[in-house]
Image: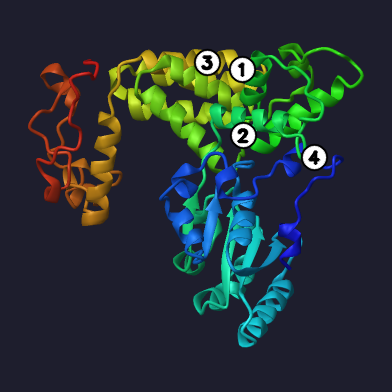
Amino acid sequence: MRGLFDAEVTDASAPLAARMRPRNLDEIVGQQHLVGDGAPMRRAIEADAPPSCILWGPPGCGKTTIARVIAGETQTEFATLSAVSSGVADLRKMIAAAESGRRDGLARTLLFIDEIHRFNKAQQDAVLHAVEDGTITLIGATTENPSFEVIAPLLSRTRVFKLEPLDTADIRRLLDRALADPERGLGRDPRAIDEVALDAIARVSGGDARVALNTLQAVVDSLAGQDRAITVDDVSEVAQRALPYDKGGDAHYDTISAFIKSVRGSDPDAAVYWLARMLEAGEDPMFVARRIVILAAEDVGLADPQALSVAVAAQQATHLIGMPECTLVLSEAAIYLARAPKSNSAMKAYSAAAGAVHELGALPVPLHLRNAATGLMAAHGYGKDYQYAHDHEGGVAADQQHLPDALSGAAFYEPSERDMRP
């Protein structure tokens, strides 16, 4: 079982990212909060006591690499499953083998499950007992938020380690290492490449080491037979920028959250940036348009009631014309809302009123506010002593109670100093 992860990939036909995969803790780039000197995971590995854990992070950040390093630097038998192609029967077979090895006094089993979020509840349930009693040490890798994709009983038996995208400096270190390594990297053919081109590869990778290294290899391969240095133009011709965005995943929710909070924070530059991030990555423009309408009422509110008209017009125009022209409409609306004065008094008023509804239930409507549609209803006091507002000075029946008796004098709407006055 260990051989799969022990073998060092040196075949020149293998992808550069596979050949350059770190072999030990010191070769890992990034994630220093986990594997740097004194970091919790490093201490556990050095103590030969790796915990059952979930490695959560975006593609290319080092989840599988860390699992391989743990396998290589601890006294364990390593088994691996992919949640894409394995089922409960495979899990049970692995666990049975681990139990047998445990009885025979062999090394404990470390089970790596890639894309564990793809396992359903029954499959995740199948490993619970083995994790709890120590039959296996589980390492699950996922790009999805474990809070939603991993069952609570399994989360309670594991530690969740959050991995971050690699920054540009980390990616540059990996690229430089690949260019200099004559055994696993590109060092046997030391082609010149200017710094601007390397920086471009680092940027286009989006924090994904696999994308960066394979892009470098693609650029080098594209110039086979040409005796010249690699330029940024060569990178532009080969690289395909893939924005990390999943309409049902964390990137979706994190980006729309950033957009909403930028508009709320009156930052038009940030608002239009996050808007572009969503639309250029393929987000449904109608999803964004609906959020803009909500923002107009929730955050601009009575400070600029016209904002709601702008937002609704933007939603309708987006539905009418679609992409790509609706980007102009949504940009205009986002900037308008970001620049507008802000008041959440309408939202707070409704929340307070809804709270009273839930707390006090269906309080009776005061008789004088009820509609006396029939003589019988009038005889029972419906509409009696009702004051018609237009008969009073200023069109306001100031001394008339409009709330139920139990809420007499309650104030749900508290005007903001930014609210427009009639």
Spatial distance from mark 3 to mark 4, Cα to Cα? 41 Å
Q: CA distance from mark 1 to mark 2?
A: 22 Å
Instruction: Please indicate, yes or no, whether residue 84 appears anywhere in the rendered image.
Output: no
Distance in Å between CA atoms under marks 1 and 3: 8 Å
Quarter residue 95 falls in: bottom right
Label 2: how many residues lie within 10 Å, few (<14), some (14-19) or many (20+)? some
Q: Say whether residue 177 is left or right of residue 49.
A: right
The correct choice, above or below, for 238 with respect to 14 in the image is above
Instruction: Please report the residue visible at 75 percent of the width from the left and 51 percent of the height from the top.
Output: 8
Sequence-wise, the earlier of marks 4 and 1 is 4
Q: Neighbour class for label 4 at 10 Å: few (<14), some, many (≥20)?
A: some
Q: Which of the labelled discs sits on residue 326, or is there none?
A: 1
Of callouts 2 and 3, the N-terminal one: 2
- The amino acid pointed to by label 1 is Cys
Residue beneath label 4, please?
A: 15
Residue to which mark 3 is pinned: 331
